[in-house]
Amino acid sequence: MRRIHVGNALSAFGLGFTVPYLYVYVAQVRGLGAATAGMVLAVFAVAALVVLPFAGRAIVRRGPLPVLLVALVTASVGALSLGLAASAVTVLLSAAALGAGQAVMQPALATMIVDVSSAETRSRAFATQFFLQNLGLGVGGLIGGHLVDATRVSSFTLLFSIEAAMFLVLVAVLGTVRMPRAVRVPAAVSAGSGWKQLLGNRAMVQLSVLGFVLFFACYGQFESGLAAYGVEAAGISTSALGTALAANTAVIVVAQFVVLRFVERRRRSRVIAAVGLIWAVAWIAAAYAGLGSGSQAMATAAFVSTYALFGLGEAMLSPTVAPLVADLAPEGLAGQYNSAFALVKQLALALGPAIGGPMGASLHGPYVVTFLVFSLGISVLALRMGRSLTPVQDQPWLARSQVVRRVAAVEPVPAKV
């Protein structure tokens, strides 16, 4: 588990090096224009949508570790090629390789965590993963920002080379992991009926719909619609926008394990419903920032608090949603379920900016109202999903309590002397 967490941190560190500067690199440094830069971002999403359905089947058949190692090598080749690419074609091909590798990493790492954790430790394991991912992204972005120079192509080549090296270091770290023996899954299930079984799982379908709304209404708006709304409607400066993003990461890093203690003994469905309410308050703060009549300082404070409240909700979701996906998966099919949920996530992240970006930039009132309604919808969907969960799926600590009671019932009572 420690090696898996180190791997998560290293991959996030590498991504943090390049993701914030990808648009500038393609459009300005390489001189390929805004259209090509936009196509690169779209290629990332398309590559993920193409490979994820096959990734689930491969993880079930081969195990998560071999699939992860192939994904890491693919991402490393894509990152290095992107740093050397000078034409639109080579940039797009490199972005496709990098995007495909990154997309497969997520369900493979999640399945590895499932395989080496128990029901009692799974929430804490996924909370630690999310904590390290955000810490790695933040540190990587900070260091990368001091290395890049928009006037020198070589500085970006160095950045992508470091990212490629991080993926190869991760290959070396995780290549030494000894995974527990995987459960044998019948060939018929591996070949395709796993998807049919997944779609027949009502709770998983409800969680997938809920997951789409979660990622569409929050993560899909961070760097697109909400940023555009802040600049256009609230007059937020670029430095203040950076402060808001930093506040989001800071809340996650500081509050993650405090929040974990709170959510571990609560119903998962109610925790997710509470996140919907918190994000509704965040959108109300955003409405005040852009549509209120307060001072610029008050508008900036409200906008920063929007990102901070989103961070609090994310910290509550990390030990809740991913472990629930694992608990809903039949034995041996965690990889299929993790890949399906990652596919839903990627679809939401592709549509979120496409819809939210133009709305946030021009339709300020409708934009805030729309995503306020989405946040309240999260609460409704979560409570409805809770009715489809078994008591142990919604309250995983009950499994441990039941085991303790059964053991106590069969222990012999010492005879009195």
Image (tube, grey):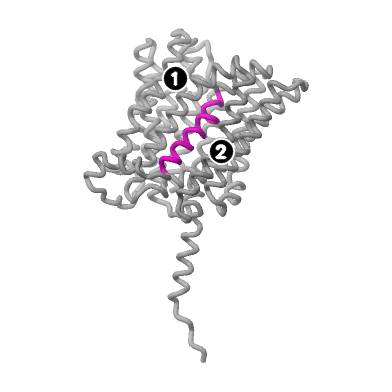
Q: Any magenta on residue 303? A: no
Task: Judge whether 63 appears above or below 404 on screen.
Answer: above
Rate crowding at label 2 as few (under 14), some (14 to 19) or many (20 or more) other CA atoms within 10 Å. many
The residue furthest bottom is 417
Q: Note whether 398 is above or below 90 in the view shown.
A: below
Q: Which span of residues is magenta-colored?
A: 204-223
Q: Compared to 161, does 322 lie above or below?
A: below
Question: In the picture, residue 141 is in which quadrant?
Answer: top right
Q: Amino acid at mark 1?
A: Leu
* Left or right, residue 288 beside residue 406: right
| Residue 35 shows in the view | yes
* Residue behind mark 1: 41
Q: SS of the residue at dot 2?
A: helix
Q: Depth check: 401 or 198 in front?
A: 198
Calculate the distance from the C-alpha at mark 2 to the C-alpha at mark 1: 24 Å
| Relative horizontal placement of residue 266, taking residue 56 as reference (left or right) | right
Quadrant of residue 356 within the rendered picture: top right
Amino acid type, callout 2 = Glu
Q: Confirm whether the magenta stretch covers residue 207.
A: yes
Q: Main secondary structure of the magenta part?
A: helix
Q: Is residue 263 left or right of residue 235?
A: left
Say which residue appears at 56% left-offset and 38% top-offset: 314
Q: Position of residue 328 (x, y in %)?
A: 40, 48
Q: Position of residue 318 (x, y in %)?
A: 52, 42
Nearer-N-terminus badge (2/1): 1
Q: What residue appears at the point 52 percent right and 48 percent down from the top-left corner?
A: 268
* Residue 62 in sight here: no
In the rendered image, residue 349, in percent from the top left (x then y), is placed at: 47, 27
Give percent across and percent down for residue 114: 40, 48
Query: Which circle marks residue 314 in the picture?
Result: 2
